[in-house]
Image (tube, grey):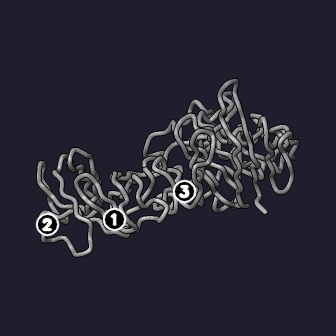
Amino acid sequence: MAYLELRKVTKRFTKTLAVSDLSLSVEKGEFISLLGPSGCGKSTTLRMIAGLESPDAGRIIIDGTDITDVPPNKRGAGMVFQSYALFPNLTVRGNIAFGLEIAGKSKVTIEETVSRMLQLVQMEGIESRYPSQLSGGQQQRVALARALAPEPHILLLDEPLSALDAMVRVDLRAEIRQIQSELRITTVYVTHDQEEALSISDRVAVMRNGTIEQIGTPEEIYRNPSSRFLAAFIGTANQFSGKAVDNCTVQGAHYNFDTVVPAELVGKPVVVLVRPENIRVFSKIEQIPNGYNLISGEVQTITFMGSVTRLTLNVYGERVVCDVPANTQHFKHNQLVHLAISPDLCQIMAE
């Protein structure tokens, strides 16, 4: 049985349907991210779990107990907000101790817990500072420590890193994942940043229009998107339009693809999805190995990205993106190149 369950949860704001008949199961100790564009319902879903919003329909279960109508402070959920939401008149120590004091814990317990939390989030030595004296990353560490101090059943994080600089964001997300793994606390993390979600989650639930479009491991979501929306939203995907003329051929206006076509798509307009890293680029057509699909195009942009160089090509008026290993080949602007795509790395979807 799942530790956290959302059963057909729906939430409407006046005429706007924010979350629609959403069901989700999260195992104990799992780190799951709700990922999606603005307005897809991910933060509303998190706020319903926290008790800050009430669902219009459906139930929310934690560890076998229905908490749908339970007040927020009785749910055993720790929440970290994008805006930190620290008490400006309290020190770092005071902020972390706040929830414990409200719960009536003893002074000894509070002191021991605060010291442990300061060590956990690497804030030892500055516990006497006030929020205004801290950087954004430090404030978010304090907010995380405050949420964890009462030992909640679940940890909820709503876009916790979006206000931080890029380098701080990368470092802090790794720390959040490390802390979560160490404590084995069930965690629901909301973000619109696909790289963030894929890098730290056990599973990712991609949301769109108030529903979950697909849920799976980061690798499953990236390598086997279930829709064109997902393919475009998660990473970069080249999309080649054509018609599936039989069970192994997609015919386009200027090129054909040999690949495996699902039986239900034969005879229909389809799209061939190919990731940039799955395209090999050659200067000479005779270099292309046998058995690969061949497309030719002209180099428009060349972008060095560290381990790879990203090429943007003009292929019969369409934009195609390829990632090639850096320092292995040198290409020039306006150069005619030839693309080799393995049939096994083509994913076919309905147009």
The secondary structure type at the circle numbered 1 is strand
Residue 158 x/y as whole percent: 62, 41
**Mark 1 residue type:** Thr
Front: mark 3 or 2: 2
Residue to which mark 1 is pinned: 249
Marks 3/2: CA distance?
Answer: 41 Å
Question: Where's the N terminus, which quadrant?
Answer: bottom right
Marks 1/2 in contact by CB < 8 Å: the verdict is no
The secondary structure type at the circle numbered 2 is helix
Residue 145 shown left or right of residue 140 in the figure: right
**Which label number is shown at residue 306?**
none
Q: Quick one: label 3 or label 2, which is nearer the N terminus?
A: 3
Q: Is the residue marked by circle 2 packed among few (<14), some (14-19), or many (20+) residues within 10 Å?
A: some
* Residue at image coords 25%, 56%: 309
Front: mark 1 or 2: 1
Query: Residue 202 occupies which quadrant of the picture?
Result: bottom right
**Which label number is shown at residue 285?**
2
Residue to which mark 3 is pinned: 200
Residue 154 shown left or right of residue 220 in the figure: right
Q: Is residue 306 visible?
A: no
Q: Is residue 254 above or below residue 98?
A: below
Q: Is residue 12 visible?
A: yes
Q: Quick one: label 1 or label 3, which is nearer the N terminus?
A: 3
**Mark 2 residue type:** Ile
Q: Is residue 345 above or below residue 239?
A: below
**Mark 3 residue type:** Ile
Q: Nearer the viewer, residue 158 or 215?
A: 215
The secondary structure type at the circle numbered 3 is helix
Q: Count the marks: how many? A: 3
* Residue at image coords 67%, 25%: 15
